[in-house]
Image (cartoon, rainbow, N blue to C red):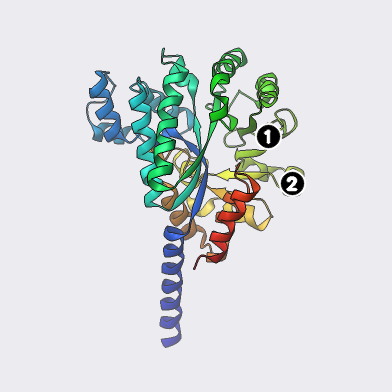
């Protein structure tokens, strides 16, 4: 009986150590949509400031609407919320609110996705969007010491022609943008639909990444690799249905930006205990942990790490691997990666 009690105590003690490690270790976030950090309170504040009507009467009503059965349920609310963003200050406030969370959670580097078409289709200029985000990036670097890069995402439910328009609009600001991505409704919108605009984007110097294999099949991941020539896969859960694909991802060291709480909320997994993250690590896949759209999915980086660590009984060494992967497969320079990797290695 005493041995059982001691075992329980050690397990609790170890679990507390893992939780403490998660909260304090320096981390990088590679899969984050800035529009998905729009907390209900800020949404209401900006809606009132801009005199924009939204289909919810209170913050509580918005929170109740955050029950999703699939990706499209979420996207409907996501676009409704984004409709209140009109001015540079709005995008600044949105982005700075996210950086504040980063500072509180020891996220020292983040690669932020933004969706220009969500705004330009409403008559908000590309310039307004990127200037607000950029000023927040500069202030966050000065105030919190957080480094960041921007990923301009094309909306896959729109046409490739629309994506080309966005590429053209981005060119005066391409010194501010590191990469291009592909997001929004995956089903029925394969990567092949955007092959030409990705080729053009790479010619302009953008690094290609893409959402694939979240709700879409493993074939979409093959397309992202072969046709879009991506450097990193966002989500990628369904790679596990194809052993040949898994081997290729391992051999080519293509990282997966995995989002546990997003997967849970969007019913990609029914329970975090069923999440494939640990299996990915065991297979040698370069998985990372990220928050995706944290205002909608119940948690920022630490919540994602803490909940998946508990659900899958991850060790501190496995957490460390995930954290190191996030820096190693970031879009930072090799020197910057090494600086952060040394910090993680020396962290106790």
Q: Residues within 10 Å of mark 2 (few under 14, many from 20)?
A: few
* Residue drawn at the location 61% of the way across and 41% of the way down: 331
Secondary structure of the residue carrying numbered label 1: loop
| Left or right for 39, reference 2 | left
Q: CA distance from mark 1 to mark 2?
A: 20 Å
Q: Is residue 89 above or below residue 104?
A: above
The residue wearing badge 2 is 243
Residue under circle 1? 230
Residue 142: quarter of image: top left
Pick the quarter of the image with the N terminus. Answer: bottom left
Q: Closer to the N terminus: mark 1 or mark 2?
A: 1
Q: How many numbered markers are drawn? A: 2
> Taking the image as drawn, is residue 276 in sight?
no
Q: Which residue is outermost to the front?
A: 142
Q: Which residue shows up at 42% across the image and 73% down it?
A: 13
Q: Position of residue 250 (x, y in %)?
A: 72, 49
115 sits to left or right of 164: left
**Displayed quadrant of residue 51:** top left
């Amino acid at each position: 009986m005493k041995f059982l009690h001691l075992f329980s105590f050690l397990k609790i003690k170890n679990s507390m150590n893992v939780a403490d490690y998660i909260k304090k270790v320096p981390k990088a976030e590679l899969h984050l949509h800035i529009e998905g950090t729009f907390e209900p309170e800020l949404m209401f504040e900006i809606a009132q400031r801009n005199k924009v009507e939204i289909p919810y009467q209170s913050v509580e009503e918005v929170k109740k609407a955050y029950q999703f059965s699939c990706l499209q349920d979420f996207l409907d609310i996501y676009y409704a919320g984004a409709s209140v963003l009109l001015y540079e200050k709005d995008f600044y406030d949105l982005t700075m609110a996210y950086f504040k969370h980063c500072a509180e959670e020891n996220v020292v580097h983040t690669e932020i996705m933004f969706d220009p078409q969500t705004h330009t289709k409403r008559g908000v200029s590309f310039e307004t969007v990127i200037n607000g985000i950029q000023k927040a990036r500069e202030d966050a670097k000065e105030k919190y010491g957080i480094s960041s890069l921007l990923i301009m995402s094309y909306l896959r439910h729109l046409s490739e022609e629309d994506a080309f328009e966005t590429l053209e609009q981005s060119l005066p600001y391409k010194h501010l943008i590191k990469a291009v991505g592909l997001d929004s409704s995956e089903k029925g919108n394969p990567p092949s639909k955007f092959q030409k605009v990705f080729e053009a984007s790479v010619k302009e110097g953008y690094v290609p990444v893409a959402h694939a294999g979240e709700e879409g099949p493993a074939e979409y991941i093959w397309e992202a690799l072969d046709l879009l020539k991506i450097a990193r896969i966002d989500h990628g859960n369904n790679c596990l249905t194809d052993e040949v694909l898994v081997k290729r991802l391992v051999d080519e060291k293509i990282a997966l930006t995995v989002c546990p709480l997003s997967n849970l909320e969007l019913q990609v997994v029914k329970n975090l205990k069923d999440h494939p993250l640990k299996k990915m690590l065991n297979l040698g896949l370069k998985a990372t942990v990220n928050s995706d759209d944290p205002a909608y999915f119940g948690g920022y980086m630490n919540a994602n790490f803490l909940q998946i660590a508990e659900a899958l009984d991850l060790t501190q060494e496995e957490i460390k691997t995930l954290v190191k992967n996030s820096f190693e497969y970031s879009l930072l320079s090799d020197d910057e990666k090494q600086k952060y990797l040394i910090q993680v290695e020396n962290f106790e």
